[in-house]
Image: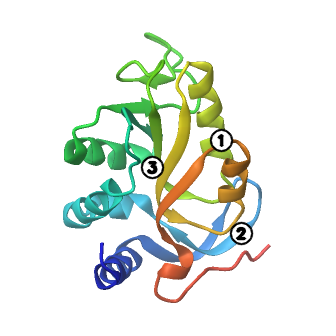
Amino acid sequence: MTVATAGHLAVRIATVACVSGSFELPDGRVLDSYFDEYQLAADPHLLHDVVDAMAGLIPKGAEVLAGVELGGIPLVVALSAVTGLPAAFLRRLPKRHGARRQVEGPTVEGRRVVLVDDVVRSGGQLLAMVQMLRVAGAPVADALCVLERPLGGRLLLSQHGVTLRPLLTEDDLPGGTSRAVS
């Protein structure tokens, strides 16, 4: 992707999916803006262009793309369609009925899985998915996201042997980064 193309895509993402307003994170910090992944996923043209760009971030040798509920699911479905790689779907907790699975889709055991999510902040959610997949026998060393917020996720994942490959960071968006208010 060229710098001009990346800049245009960043503007489109910011226009459609970056929302100003108070947003509380699970750890209690409050941000003055947030990334609304549902607005991105609801725009078929933007979703198509985002996953086309993200496809170039997938490392060679990837065998399965795994989307984290809920924001990573539309992305992993679209990425699977674009790349031909199978998609797996990850729940934070095992389903409470039926097959009671935490991983839906193809077998991940022994296969190189790449995690897919919408936004990475602290990295805690992705790390939990990495650990769950590793227990299931999947060697996980890479994670993709649309947007990386500078709240420690890259460092946390790196400390656990996972390379974060964001399409964009907050600095790439028009207007720069948002601030943690508390």
Q: Give the residue drawn at x 26%, y 67%.
A: 46
Figure check: 35 above or below 134: below
Q: Is residue 9 left or right of residue 129?
A: left
Q: Nearer the viewer, residue 43 or 110?
A: 110
Q: Is residue 126 left or right of residue 74?
A: right
Looking at the image, the residue that sits furthest to the front is 60
Determine whether the residue tagged by mark 2 lies in a helix, strand or loop: strand
Verify CB contact (< 8 Å) between mark 3 and mark 1: no
Q: Which residue is mark 2?
A: 30
Determine whether the residue tagged by mark 3 lies in a helix, strand or loop: loop
- Residue 68, can we see it? no
Cα–Cα span, label 3 and label 1: 16 Å
Which of pointers 1 and 2 lies earlier in the amino acid sequence? 2
Expressed as whole percent of the image width and height from the top left, the position of residue 8 reads 31, 82
Figure check: 93 above or below 130: above
Looking at the image, the residue that sits furthest to the top is 99
Determine whether the residue tagged by mark 1 lies in a helix, strand or loop: helix
Question: For the residue marked with disc 2, what is the amino acid?
Answer: Val
Expressed as whole percent of the image width and height from the top left, the position of residue 77 reads 29, 42
Q: Give the residue drawn at x 55%, y 19%.
A: 137
Question: For the residue marked with disc 1, what is the amino acid?
Answer: Leu
Q: Is residue 98 left or right of residue 154?
A: left
Q: Which residue is mark 3?
A: 71
Q: Which mark is residue 127?
A: 1
Image quarter in which the N terminus is found: bottom left
Expressed as whole percent of the image width and height from the top left, the position of residue 18 reads 46, 74
Which of the 4 image quadrants contains residue 37?
bottom left
Question: For the residue marked with disc 3, what is the amino acid?
Answer: Gly
Around disc 1, counting alpha carbons within 10 Å, would you say few (fewer than 14), some (14 to 19), or many (20 or more)? some
